Image: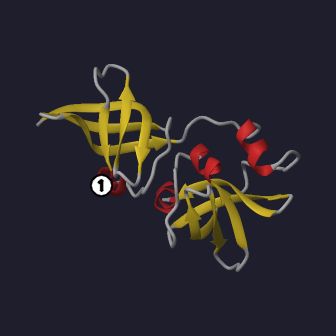
Amino acid sequence: MKNNGTVRGQVKWFDTTKGFGFIVADGCKTEILLHANVLQSFGRNSIASNAVIEVVVQQTDRGCQATEILKIEPPAVSAGSEVYLKILGEGVEIDPSAPLKPARVKWFDRQKGFGFVNIFGSAEDVFVHVEILHTCGLTELMPGEAVSVRTATGPRGLMVWDVQVWDHVLAKAV
């Protein structure tokens, strides 16, 4: 294997069931393979298509592979975008300056496209939609996973509009 250095690109797709996906990057002639174990070493179980990613790559006999993730940025989506209007409903106020709240995933079903989290200190179930995860650079959540969320009150109750992986929120705080 030959180390080719650091590359910044976009996730083409990642399938948690298959355990891999691909990154496309300017200056690379081929797609870069991203294994689930490399993603898990970064503290993530999933990553959304179009997320911006910075990785260390190596050229192997089978092609270019990511060996380490340095940074992940969610796909660019503004607070007033169609995604938020479609999922949260029109007129729902979101506050980007609101503090992140620690929460644990109660359950999430990727096929159904939604799940629930519980904010620490509250027994109330808080709805989270798969499209919201995609705007945050994720594709699914695992039961029991610790996350940080921002919420808004929608027509059917409390709903998540921002999800961040717990480890990365702690790293930013230090």
Residue bearing mark 1: 37
Q: Residues within 10 Å of mark 1 (few under 14, many from 20)?
A: some
Q: Residue at x 66, y 72 (%)?
A: 119
Residue 146 falls left or right of residue 17: right
Q: Residue at x 65, y 72 (%)?
A: 118
Q: Residue furthest front?
A: 111
- Identity, as a three-letter code, of the amino acid under mark 1: Asn
Could you say where residue 41 lies in the image, as x and y percent from the top left?
Answer: 32, 56
Q: Nearer the viewer, residue 148 or 10?
A: 10
Q: In which quarter of the image is the N terminus?
A: top left
Q: Quadrant of residue 59?
A: top left
Q: Is residue 89 above or below residue 174?
A: above
Q: Nearer the viewer, residue 94 or 111?
A: 111
**Can residue 109 be seen at all in this image of the molecule?**
yes
Q: Is residue 108 above or below residue 11?
A: below
Here the colouring is secondary structure
Q: Is mark 1 on a helix, strand or loop?
A: helix
Could you say where residue 38 lies in the image, as x and y percent from the top left?
Answer: 30, 51
Residue 14 falls left or right of residue 77: left
Could you say where residue 144 lies in the image, as x and y percent from the top left?
Answer: 51, 73
Could you say where residue 147 lies in the image, as x and y percent from the top left?
Answer: 55, 63
**Can residue 99 be seen at all in this image of the molecule?**
no
Q: In which quarter of the image is residue 53?
A: top left
Q: Which residue is drawn at 78% across and 50% down?
A: 88
Residue 128 falls left or right of residue 73: right
Give the tally of numbered discs. Answer: 1
Q: Residue at x 43, y 39 (%)?
A: 13
